[in-house]
Image (cartoon, helix red, strand yellow):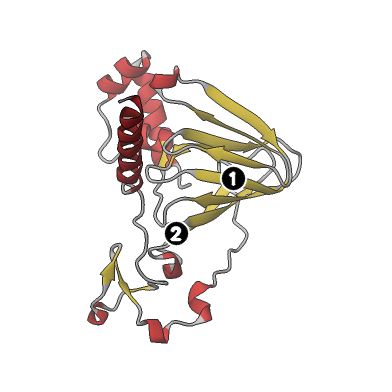
Amino acid sequence: MMKGSVFISLIALFALACSFASAYDPSPLQDFCVGVNDTKLGVFVNGRFCKDPKLVKAEDFFFHINEGNTSNPLGSQVTQVSVAEFPGLNTLGISLARIDYAPYGLNPPHTHPRATEVLTVLEGTLMVGFVASNQNDNRFFTKVLNKGDVFIFPFGMIHFQINVGHGNAVALSSLSSQNPGVITIARAVFGSNPLIPSDVLSKAFQVDKKIIALLQKQQGSNNY
């Protein structure tokens, strides 16, 4: 009886794992599906039409990422390479981004609603961190990374990176979705469209409405 219960539990656990996996990008049923905007092609997968496989070339799987311009208030620039920028990623369940940091530049607290992130430092020294959910008492995990170091930001966790070195820094972000999305916390809370009512934010943050108004104005004037 005990062996039977263990077997049933294992089957249930496997089914749960399969159902959980289905919440992410679906597994492809073909070698590739290079996204195109031509509706005449007729094959629609993951929100995009597929290029005729016979017409696919090596260039469809190639992308060059330029250095980002860090001359902005945050001193950082994220160059996203999701399926929107790189159609060859369609159905492959991955994407990436190059992040450039000026000295003391910050990639501000944000979250990816559809992906786990693996960050690799290519140049410089970064302090990185993420905050766990309420379930885990909002624990803060942080580490200083140097060239060649890798750090994981679990699915949906709020995280950031800041350049703590005296020179420029560069990192490569790998994400487990072709379209991971991003929610920058300050911009979402204080720069939404339309704005969240100030009395809601004032009560939530336990500060005067004048401070909320200042933060909303600040977010509205930023172009990063």
Q: Looking at the picture, how far across and down is residue 87, in whole percent?
A: 42, 69
Q: Residues within 10 Å of mark 1 (few under 14, many from 20)?
A: many
Badge 2 element: loop
Q: Quadrant of the N terminus?
A: top left
Residue reaching furthest right? 166
Q: Which of marks 1 and 2 precedes in the sequence?
A: 2
Tell me, yes or no, if residue 191 can be seen here. Answer: no
Q: How many marks?
A: 2
Residue 8 position by quadrant: top left
Residue type of the residue flagged with mark 2: Ser
Residue reaching furthest bottom? 54
Residue lying at 36% horizontally and 32% vertically, measured from the top left: 190
Residue lying at 36% horizontally and 54% vertically, measured from the top left: 25
- Image marks 2 and 1: residues in contact by CB distance under 8 Å: no
Tell me, yes or no, if residue 185 can be seen here. Answer: yes
Q: Looking at the picture, how far across and down is residue 211, in whole percent?
A: 40, 21
Q: Residues within 10 Å of mark 2 (few under 14, many from 20)?
A: many
Residue for badge 1: 119
Residue for badge 2: 82
- Relative to residue 155, is residue 52 depicted above or below? below
Q: Looking at the picture, how far across and down is residue 170, in whole percent?
A: 66, 50
Viewer-side residue, 66 vs 54: 54
Q: Looking at the picture, how far across and down is residue 106, in whole percent?
A: 59, 38
Q: Is residue 69 left or right of residue 24?
A: right
Residue 124 position by quadrant: top right
Q: Is residue 62 left or right of residue 18?
A: right
Residue 203 position by quadrant: top left
Badge 1 element: strand
